[in-house]
């Protein structure tokens, strides 16, 4: 079966067809680099489409490359200055009609997450603004920030409100676009594109777990202790989804070995300083005999260390563990029996 030739006369090419023709036009090296960023299903569909093309007419090739260039240009402008700015630039470059066509194509699928500007702002600046706001307002803003940002801010807030805010994040379901828009306007910055008018979901237990994973251990303990009094079921659900250094005993041996390999030896030594004998033994069990002997000797001669240094080392090991889980390198069994390893 021969491939099909594509000529200028063919109308109404689908997005998948245009993508296939674009990759053919860009050549094998560039196409291979693009493939690295696609899912297996996308690769399969594109490869099937490419295999069916025998020839690409020069005119079609130029038109598709130009269309791709214009869309990429518009996306770049949007990332710099918003859709309004992108439209202004495109109108000057291409004329009103073509500019509007490109913008419409982009905005049909573009979703700008609320508080995007805040995620590019230093946490200290955000803290200075929101520290005296209503706890519900603080919870809403933190739920939209990056977990690390939110963790820093939550740690900086007074202890007496930390648990309340964490609970509000966990219980948050959806917030109307009007409320979000009003809070953004108080932050004196409007989103650069039209926010979808659907109710925006944020918060929830997963969100508060991510935030708590970004706070220091003392803040985490203070919040969870308070939540155990206010809402024991919520506290238990949060703890089920969190991973702390001592939870390394729940990992399988292969995962523990991978964590050990990716962590600094100094961090492991510090982290084990105050850990239980069970934790120490399972870590030693997954080291080589030589490494375990070296660690035991160094721990015997190790002098006093600051508790904060030990906790920081444990947090770095937990961060490595979570990074490996995100990458699919290891599996962390969560509460509730959902993560059965077979």
Image: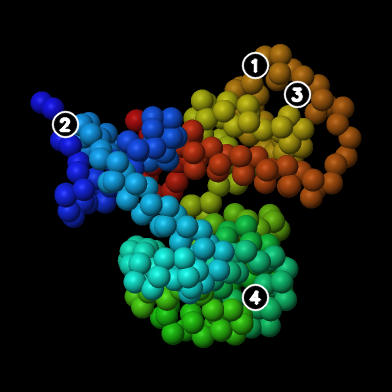
Are discs 2 and 1 less than 8 Å apart at CB? no
**SS assignment at label 4:** helix
**x then y, percent, for residue 277:** 67, 33
Residue indicated by mark 4: 161
The answer to whether residue 266 of the structure is visible from this angle is yes
Q: Is residue 138 above or below residue 41?
A: below
> What residue is shown at x 62% (from left), y 64% (from top)?
120
Circle 2 SS class: loop
Residue closest to the eye, 312 or 187: 187
Circle 1: element type: loop
Describe residue 270's horizontal placement relative to residue 34 as left or right: right
Q: Sequence order check: which comes first, mark 2 or mark 1?
A: 2
Q: Give the CA separation, mark 2 to mark 1.
A: 57 Å
**Where does residue 46 sit, x and y in percent of width and height?**
27, 39
Q: Earlier in the sequence, mark 3 or mark 4?
A: 4
Q: Which of marks 2 and 4 precedes in the sequence?
A: 2
SS assignment at label 3: helix
């Amino acid at each position: 079966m021969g491939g099909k030739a594509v000529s200028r006369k063919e109308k109404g090419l689908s997005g998948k067809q245009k993508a296939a023709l674009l990759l053919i036009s860009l050549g094998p090296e560039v196409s291979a680099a693009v493939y690295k960023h696609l899912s297996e299903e996308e690769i399969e569909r594109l490869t099937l489409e490419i295999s069916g093309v025998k020839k690409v007419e020069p005119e079609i090739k130029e038109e598709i490359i130009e269309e791709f260039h214009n869309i990429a240009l518009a996306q770049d402008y949007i990332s710099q200055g918003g859709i309004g700015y992108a439209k202004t630039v495109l109108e000057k470059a291409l004329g009103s009609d073509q500019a509007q066509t490109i913008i419409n194509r982009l905005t049909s699928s573009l979703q700008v997450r609320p508080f995007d500007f805040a995620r590019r702002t230093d946490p200290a600046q955000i803290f200075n603004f929101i520290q005296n706001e209503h706890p519900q307002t603080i919870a809403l803003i933190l739920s939209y920030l990056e977990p690390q940002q939110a963790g820093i801010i939550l740690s900086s807030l007074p202890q007496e409100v930390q648990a309340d805010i964490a609970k509000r994040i966990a219980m948050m379901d959806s917030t109307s676009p009007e409320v979000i828009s009003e809070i953004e306007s108080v932050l004196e910055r409007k989103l650069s594109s039209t926010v979808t008018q659907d109710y925006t979901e944020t918060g929830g237990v997963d969100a508060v777990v991510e935030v708590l994973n970004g706070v220091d251990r003392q803040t985490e303990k203070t919040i969870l202790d308070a939540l155990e009094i206010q809402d024991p079921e919520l506290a238990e659900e949060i703890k089920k989804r969190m991973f702390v250094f001592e939870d390394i005993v729940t990992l399988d041996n292969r995962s523990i070995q991978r964590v050990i390999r990716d962590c600094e030896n100094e961090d492991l030594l510090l982290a084990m300083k105050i850990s239980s004998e069970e934790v120490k033994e399972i870590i030693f069990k997954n080291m080589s005999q030589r490494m375990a002997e070296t660690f035991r000797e160094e721990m015997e001669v190790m002098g006093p260390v600051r508790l904060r240094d030990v906790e920081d080392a444990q947090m770095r090991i937990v961060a490595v563990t979570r990074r490996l889980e995100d990458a699919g390198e290891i599996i962390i069994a969560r509460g509730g029996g959902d993560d059965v390893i077979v």
